[in-house]
Image: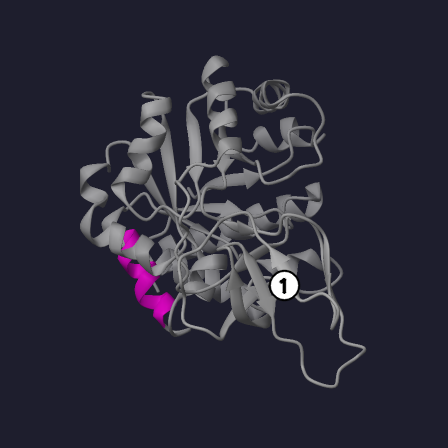
Amino acid sequence: MAEILVTTAPDAPFIPAVARIEAVAGFRFNTGYSYFKGSKGDVLLAFKAATGRKAAWVDLKTRELKLVAATDITPDNQLLEINHRIEAIDLPTLLYFNEGKKAVEIDKVIDGNKLHVSVPPGRKDFKITFGKGTSFNMPGARVMDGFLTPRDVEFVKAARELGMHDYCLSYVEAASDVDELLRLDPDARVIAKIESPRGLQFVASEYRSVKDKVRLLAARGDLYVELDRPHDILHALRAIVDADPRAIGASRLLLSFLDPGSMPSCADICDVGFLCKLGYRAFLLGDELCADEEVLKSAIGAILAIQEGHDAWRF
């Protein structure tokens, strides 16, 4: 049977009902959300209580690039301030958002964390609105700050005090990243999200040294954007599951299910079948898919049916 991890807010009312589904092995709380109320300890306590006996994974954001404040890019304001300082990068370069569906050109980096957007000349009406916390991809950029952010550290301390030791780590790129978490929580169990070419290098060269503590996750949303060529994702997915047969497939899964009045897309069904063929038996469902109970249950049912078909037909 497939193993399903579900992304959820700590106060989602349907967590207990979804937790009763046998295939659901655990829940992931995305700490990138900023809307929740109360202390980090209060939030994690509510999350732990709601998930019951199922694993409760605390997702830390580490190197993920995010916008510090809501910003309108216009001819009069062309700066985006991000949460990390980055090393020098060849300019101009593209900054992707919305999982690579859109991009703006960056022609200057100021003080490491202020990105100057190139606005088309003569476009006085040019305007792009970015919300606070918008996530970006800048392929090839290297974050200069440490691995865990101060906010990540606060969540780890709060989790450890509650006896919670399950963490998802974004943008793992070296065994030292895992060691940084283990110094804060020696009992930590880790899902390492592979989201960059450097993450794939870690899989190839260093993963063996930490595999007893670490399970790999193919975070296809960011990984696909960060790779040099789109078709490189195929080799990347194979490399991850070859290194860790327990690896989890994630991101861009079954998005056609978000339109419940329509038939699921053939591409979505074939996508999950392809992951099964590669050897993936575990899947993490993302934020959008898990926002509605019925959509989520339909997606879980589809994955179970696809895997059952794969196991029976051996296509």
Q: Name the residue under label 1.
A: 264
**Considering only vertical position in the picture, is 27 above or below 187?**
below
| Residue 174: x %, y % from top left | 28, 45
Q: Quadrant of residue 276?
A: bottom left
**Three-letter code for the amino acid on which mark 1 is drawn:** Pro
Q: Please name the residue shown 30% across and 54% down the image.
A: 240
| Residue 171: x %, y % from top left | 41, 48
Q: In this view, does 75 lie to the left or right of 268?
A: right
Location of the N terminus (image quadrant): top left
**Considering only vertical position in the picture, is 23 above or below 267?**
above
Q: Is mark 1 on a helix, strand or loop?
A: loop
**Considering only vertical position in the picture, is 163 above or below 171?**
above
Q: Please name the residue shown 68% across and 49% down the image.
A: 69
Outermost residue to the front? 111
Q: Does the magenta stretch include residue 242?
A: no
In the image, which residues are magenta? 232-241
Residue 23 in view here? no
**Considering only vertical position in the picture, is 101 above or below 137?**
below
Location of the C terminus (image quadrant): bottom left
